[in-house]
Image (tube, coloured by chain):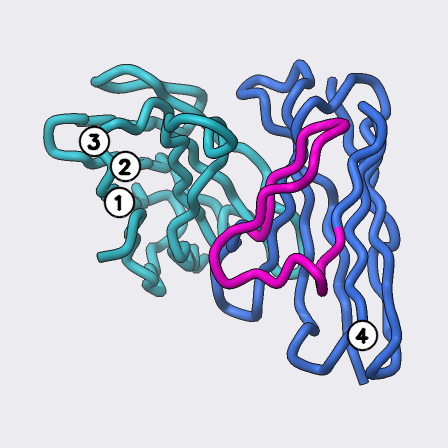
């Protein structure tokens, strides 16, 4: 089945530093990658949608200069949280389209980001 | 009005009972509907998806869709303590351009199955 590998699974960083999260599709080509953020006891909120080779489309209220998304290949998409602050602490999840999962969406395992 | 609404619960049912989870959505153009289960600290895992009006059964799970009422539900028969989790309803709203294919999630319903 389709698998998306997301790394790291958790990361702690200091305020003001940048953190990169990677999502790799292992056995399929991810034409589209969705990036979600989930705060405690809340649902998944879509941050941005990226298509391979194109600029990402950000949802309203998401700062594109702060959350840099790169989807340079069909198997790798990255999210970089720049100048992280404690309020960026959250659970970040990627979801890829293009695989052979039953419904076409394959989720990564998530990254727990804690900014101290 | 939220695009996808769920009762946040918590919903508590005894082991062996039927758990009923409900979801309403606002976009009449929505094409497909998904139920995910999410354990604390984990990524969502797909339980079922449904496209057509009516019922769809898979093991102990039954999804029900009524597009006229903009309502989708999930029934869990013979509930087990291991079913205790947050259940997320998600809707794929077809729209033009880059919005195509994105999932909009409800806030989730916390289900607790007690022995």
Q: Is any atom of residue B85 visible in this view?
A: no
Q: Position of residue B7 (x, y in %)?
A: 28, 58
Q: Residue at x 77, y 63 (%)?
A: A81
Chain B, chosen colour in render:
cyan
Q: Which residues are magenta?
A: A47-68
Q: Chain of mark 3?
A: B
State the CA–CA distance, disc 4 to disc 3. 40 Å
State yes or no: discs 3 and 2 in contact (Cβ < 8 Å). no
Disc marking residue B85: none
Relative horizontal placement of residue B80, taking residue B91 as reference (left or right): right
Q: Residue at x 45, y 57 (%)?
A: B115
- Rendered image quadrant of residue A91: bottom right
Q: Which residue is mark 1?
A: B22
Viewer-side residue, A98 vs B95: B95
* Mark 4, other Cα within 10 Å: few <14 / some 14–19 / many ≥20: some
Q: Which residue is mark 4?
A: A83
Q: Which residue is mark 2?
A: B73
Viewer-side residue, B4 vs B18: B4
Q: Chain of mark 4?
A: A
- Earlier-in-chain disc, 1 versus 2: 1
| Chain in blue colour | A
SS of the residue at dot 1?
A: strand
* Mark 1, other Cα within 10 Å: few <14 / some 14–19 / many ≥20: many
Q: Is any atom of residue B112 visible in this view?
A: yes
**Closer to the observer: label 3 or label 1?**
3
State yes or no: discs 1 and 2 in contact (Cβ < 8 Å). yes
């Amino acid at each position: 089945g389709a698998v998306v590998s997301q790394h790291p699974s958790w990361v702690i960083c200091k305020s003001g530093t940048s953190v990169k999260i990677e999502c790799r599709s292992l056995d399929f080509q991810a034409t589209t990658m969705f990036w979600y953020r989930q705060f405690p006891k809340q649902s998944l909120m879509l941050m941005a949608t990226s298509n391979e080779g194109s600029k990402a489309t950000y949802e309203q209220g998401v700062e594109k200069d702060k959350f840099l998304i790169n989807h340079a290949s069909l198997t790798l998409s990255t999210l970089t949280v720049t100048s992280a602050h404690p309020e960026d602490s959250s659970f970040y999840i990627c979801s890829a389209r293009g695989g052979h999962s039953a419904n076409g969406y394959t989720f990564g395992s998530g990254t727990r980001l804690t900014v101290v | 009005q939220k695009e996808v609404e769920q009762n946040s619960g918590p919903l508590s049912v005894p082991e062996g009972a039927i758990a009923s989870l409900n979801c309403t959505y606002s976009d009449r153009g929505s094409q497909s509907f998904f139920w995910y289960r999410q354990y604390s600290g984990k990524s969502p895992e797909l339980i079922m998806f449904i496209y057509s009006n009516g019922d769809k059964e898979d093991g102990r799970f039954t999804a029900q869709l009524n597009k006229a009422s903009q309502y989708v539900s999930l029934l869990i028969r013979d509930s087990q303590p291991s079913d205790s989790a947050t259940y997320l309803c998600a809707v794929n709203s077809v729209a033009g351009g880059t919005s195509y294919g994105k999932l909009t999630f409800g806030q989730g319903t916390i289900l607790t199955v007690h022995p």
